[in-house]
Image (spheres, rainbow, N blue to C red):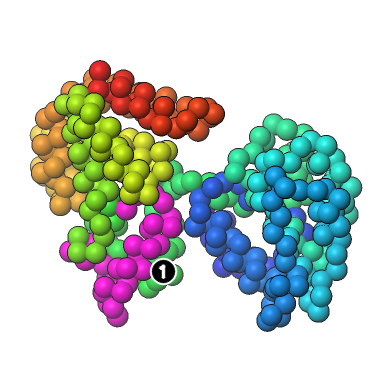
């Protein structure tokens, strides 16, 4: 899926009539929008006449259909972006269906969904008539190809160890990854290879220090400090789901670290097994002493339930986060 979107961003032509984008990853949404604008508005200065941004929450269906049928001005195509498309009602899709079934070749219609119910009838019809582009928040194992893609964009090269360290310091948010890579490029200048010393010099340690502090506080069952360190993570522009993902990653590393120690592996092999940089060996060695195997397993179960609740429940995310810490520190 990642490679498919990367290829599309590089060369989306020939453009079709109907696209829908699913997800809330800000960087991907921004790049998808830029790609449409670049390839639809090839005539300079025509974007103001041939582009509409519509919010479904403030939508009049008659106006939308009228916009979709409007011919472009001194251009081959016009572009219509439709935000919050998950707010479309079933009857709205019924009104759009005849039009979508025989589209205007001069219009590119792009709907953005935060999430989508793939069981619904309208979505099954949508799949047959539109192109799906994913802008969903990345899982940990999906980050690596995007790191390679962004590194190539800014003309940087990472070794496996510097890549692992960068991932630990920055996390999985693509916009943050891209911003930090741009800072690195300014720092290294004409040099392409990024060293671990470069990363320590440039990338903020605030987030990773907060993660170590948070897991240490959970290990000591210190609820007050746990809440404080979680708040610091969120203040550092980390989403609630992202904060849980970072904690979960940290706990998986601790489990691998303990496994390596139990097998009496040398330091280099423990680092390879856990997928961590030598810079963090002492920190993980110290923290691994605070946790039993059963405690790590229990916290991972609590994290899984908290993550599922955050993504599916209408309750405030802070309630689920506090509930996670109450359980983890009990």
Q: Which one is in front, 105 or 226?
A: 226
Residue 311 location in percent, x, y? Answer: 50, 33
Residue 200 location in percent, x, y? Answer: 20, 60
- The answer to whether residue 251 is seen in the rendering is no
Q: Is residue 319 left or right of residue 279?
A: right
* Residue in the image at 76% along x and 73% along y: 49
> Does residue 55 lie above or below 323 as drawn?
below
Using the rendered view, name the quadrant where residue 202 is placed: bottom left
* Residue in the image at 31% along x and 74% along y: 186
Residue lying at the far front of the rendered structure: 58
> Does residue 151 lie above or below 21 as drawn?
below
Q: Is residue 41 left or right of residue 91?
A: left
Label 1 element class: helix
> Where is the C terminus found, in terms of image quarters?
top left
Using the rendered view, name the quadrant where residue 121 is placed: top right
Residue identified by numbered label 1: 152
71 in the magenta segment: no
191 in the magenta segment: yes
Q: Is residue 193 left or right of residue 238?
A: left
Q: Decide: few, some or many residues near mark 1? Use Cα within 10 Å; few <14, some 14-19, many ≥20.
A: few
Q: Which one is in front, 17 or 90?
A: 90
Residue 120 location in percent, x, y? Answer: 73, 33
Q: Which one is in front, 312 or 121?
A: 312
* Residue in the image at 26% along x and 74% along y: 188
- The answer to whether residue 290 is seen in the rendering is yes
* Residue in the image at 65% along x and 46% along y: 84
Give the overall secondary structure of the magenta segment.
helix
Q: Is residue 169 left or right of residue 83?
A: left
> Does residue 102 lie above or below 286 as drawn?
below
Residue 224 location in percent, x, y? Answer: 23, 28
- Over which residues does the magenta segment extend? 170-199
Q: How many marks?
A: 1
């Amino acid at each position: 899926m990642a490679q498919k979107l990367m290829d599309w961003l590089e060369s989306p032509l020939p453009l079709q009539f109907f696209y829908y984008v699913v997800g809330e990853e800000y960087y991907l949404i921004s790049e998808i929008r830029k790609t449409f604008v670049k390839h639809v508005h090839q005539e300079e200065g025509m974007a103001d006449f041939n582009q509409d941004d519509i919010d479904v929450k403030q939508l009049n269906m008659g106006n939308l259909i009228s916009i979709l049928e409007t011919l472009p001005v001194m251009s081959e195509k016009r572009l219509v972006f439709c935000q919050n498309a998950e707010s479309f009602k079933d009857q709205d899709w019924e009104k759009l269906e005849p039009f979508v079934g025989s589209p205007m070749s001069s219009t590119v219609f792009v709907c953005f969904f935060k999430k989508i119910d793939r069981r619904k009838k309208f979505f099954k019809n949508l799949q047959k008539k539109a192109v799906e582009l994913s802008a969903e928040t990345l899982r940990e194992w999906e980050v690596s190809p995007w790191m390679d893609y962004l590194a190539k964009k800014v003309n940087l090269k990472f070794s496996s160890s510097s890549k692992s360290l960068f991932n630990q310091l920055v996390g999985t948010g693509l916009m943050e990854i891209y911003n930090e890579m741009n800072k690195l490029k300014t720092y290294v200048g004409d040099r392409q290879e990024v060293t671990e010393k470069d990363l320590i010099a440039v990338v903020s340690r605030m987030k990773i220090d907060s993660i170590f502090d948070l897991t240490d506080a959970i290990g000591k069952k210190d609820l007050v400090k746990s809440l404080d360190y979680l708040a610091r993570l969120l203040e550092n522009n980390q989403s609630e789901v992202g904060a849980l993902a970072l904690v979960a990653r940290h706990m998986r590393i601790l489990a691998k670290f303990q496994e390596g120690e139990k097998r009496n592996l040398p330091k280099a092999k423990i680092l390879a097994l856990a997928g961590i940089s030598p810079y963090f060996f002492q920190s993980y060695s110290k923290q691994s002493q605070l946790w039993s195997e059963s405690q790590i397993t229990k916290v991972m179960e609590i994290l899984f339930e908290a993550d599922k609740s955050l993504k599916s429940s209408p309750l405030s995310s802070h309630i689920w986060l506090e509930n996670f810490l109450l359980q983890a520190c009990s």
